[in-house]
């Protein structure tokens, strides 16, 4: 297995076909470059680690390529200088690391006229620029962008840029790659670095753990490769993965109103390998998988016995209990730090809420049953009294004629 350092650097795309994800933009960017219609001022927005900088650099490499045919050609002087990291045509500025005393110099350099050829300026996280002074100064420069100059802003917070600046640029919002696209990235890394491809559940866990961030996935894989073996057993231990059986047991214990909170805690401790943090984070996907099967008939990777068990509890408990669980899971932010004890406390709190809802329902049902029984008793008594009175009329006997007498017959109800 190759132990090249910095896998993200090694996996940087040299051609458009090397990009994983962003399929809605890759073809469009290629066409814009080939037809010389790429905007002179653009913004690439999106979450961290989705490839904004990589795509901006590939756009820059393509725009400055002087080769014939497919661009970037990888063979011209500009492409070679870019690949060596010495390009004078594609210039990057990491705005958070530039002091305000030098930003004026940067802005002047960007907007000055230069007849030596195409230049591409990539501004990383430009939203950190002072809104009132620097961004306004930059906005003024965009009214006179020289020919053959392209400015690309990469930012995780495009709406921190002043509206006038956003309106003047062409904005492209990059999306988080899908699970399948991230798994394809792992396959390519496996081929490039020579490690055995992990099982599909481990790759899926990698993707979820890194929030579908290609950069995060490659960093995690690199760390594991440098630490030694990457077989499935080692990876499972490292990741402390929970199988669907654990999620099934926890979900059913939550839904089972015959289990006390102490029974629930026992379930959490039955398996010493249970990681409550992973339970909290993974239960949402498991519940969603179950709902997709129940509601839409979309087959998910859930064993049949577990599926039947969960479905039985869902039918018995109804929608209110499930609503409580989905509200709880929807409030979990996978980007937040959470300790194992915090995660267990959250699960126990949820169980207590579900038990409280069940208790209230039992009390409510009991009251309804008691009221219904009382009304039935009154109805039966009235019917019996009426029938007795009718019999007395038929037999010629006197019968009740006053409300007071009727109340006496119904007393005690």
Image (tube, rainbow, N blue to C red):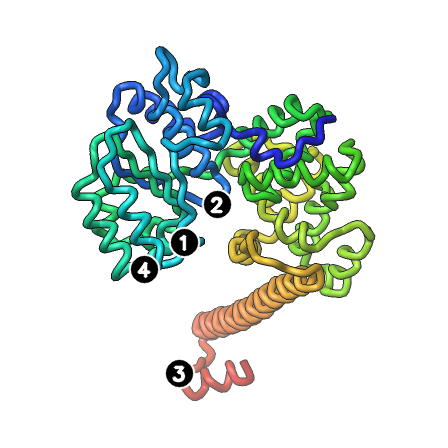
Which residue is denoted by mark 2 in the rendering?
48
Disc 2: CA contacts within 10 A as few (<14), some (14-19) or many (>=20): some
**Mark 2 and mark 4: span between their CA atoms?**
21 Å
Among numbered discs 2 and 3, the one appearing first in the sequence: 2
Among numbered discs 4 and 1, the one appearing first in the sequence: 1
**Which numbered disc covers residue 130?**
4
| Residue 137, position as x, y percentages in the image | 23, 54
| Residue 363, position as x, y percentages in the image | 59, 70
**Mark 4 and mark 3: span between their CA atoms?**
92 Å
Q: Is residue 11 above or below residue 373?
A: above
Q: Residue at x 30, y 19 (%)?
A: 34
**Rendering quarter of residue 73:** top left
- Residue 156 in view here: no
Dots 4, 3 in contact, CB < 8 A: no
Dots 3, 1 in contact, CB < 8 A: no
Dots 2, 3 in contact, CB < 8 A: no
As rendered, which of 380 and 61 lies closer to the eye? 61
Which residue is denoted by mark 1 in the rendering?
98
**Mark 2 and mark 1: span between their CA atoms?**
20 Å
Classify mark 3: helix, strand or loop. loop
């Amino acid at each position: 297995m190759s132990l090249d350092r910095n896998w993200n650097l090694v996996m940087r795309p040299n051609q458009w076909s090397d990009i994983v994800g962003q399929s809605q933009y890759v073809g469009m960017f290629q066409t814009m470059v080939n037809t010389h219609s790429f905007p002179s001022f653009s913004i690439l927005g999106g979450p961290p680690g989705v490839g904004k900088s990589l795509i901006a650099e590939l756009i820059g490499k393509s725009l400055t390529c002087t080769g014939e045919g497919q661009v970037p050609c990888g063979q011209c002087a500009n492409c070679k200088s870019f690949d060596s990291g010495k390009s004078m045509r594609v210039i990057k500025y990491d705005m958070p690391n530039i002091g305000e005393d030098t930003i004026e110099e940067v802005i002047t350099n960007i907007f000055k006229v230069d007849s030596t050829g195409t230049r591409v300026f990539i501004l990383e996280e430009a939203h950190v620029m002072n809104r009132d002074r620097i961004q306004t100064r930059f906005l003024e420069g965009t009214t006179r962008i020289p020919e053959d100059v392209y400015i690309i802003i990469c930012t995780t917070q495009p709406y921190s840029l002043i509206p006038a600046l956003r309106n003047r640029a062409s904005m492209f919002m990059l999306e988080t790659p899908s699970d399948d696209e991230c798994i394809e990235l792992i396959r390519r890394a496996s081929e490039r670095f020579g490690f055995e491809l992990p099982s599909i559940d481990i790759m899926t866990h990698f993707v979820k753990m890194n929030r579908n961030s290609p950069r995060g996935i490659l960093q995690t894989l690199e760390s594991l490769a440098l630490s030694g073996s990457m077989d499935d057993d080692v990876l499972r231990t490292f990741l402390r993965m929970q199988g669907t059986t654990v999620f099934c047991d926890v979900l059913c214990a939550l839904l089972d109103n015959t289990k006390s909170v102490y029974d629930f805690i026992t379930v959490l401790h039955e398996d010493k390998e249970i990681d409550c943090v992973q339970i909290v984070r993974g239960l949402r996907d498991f519940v969603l998988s179950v709902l997709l099967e129940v509601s839409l008939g979309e087959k998910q990777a859930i064993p049949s016995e577990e599926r039947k068990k969960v479905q039985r509890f869902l039918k018995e408990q109804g929608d209110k209990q499930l609503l409580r669980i989905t509200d709880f899971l929807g409030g979990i932010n996978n980007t937040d730090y959470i300790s194992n004890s915090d995660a267990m406390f959250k699960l126990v709190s949820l169980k207590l809420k579900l038990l409280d809802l069940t208790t209230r329902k039992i009390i409510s049902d009991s009251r309804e049953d008691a009221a219904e029984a009382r009304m039935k008793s009154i109805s039966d008594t009235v019917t019996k009294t009426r029938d007795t009175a009718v019999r007395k009329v038929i037999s010629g006997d006197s019968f009740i004629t006053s409300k007071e007498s009727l109340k006496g017959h119904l007393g005690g109800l």
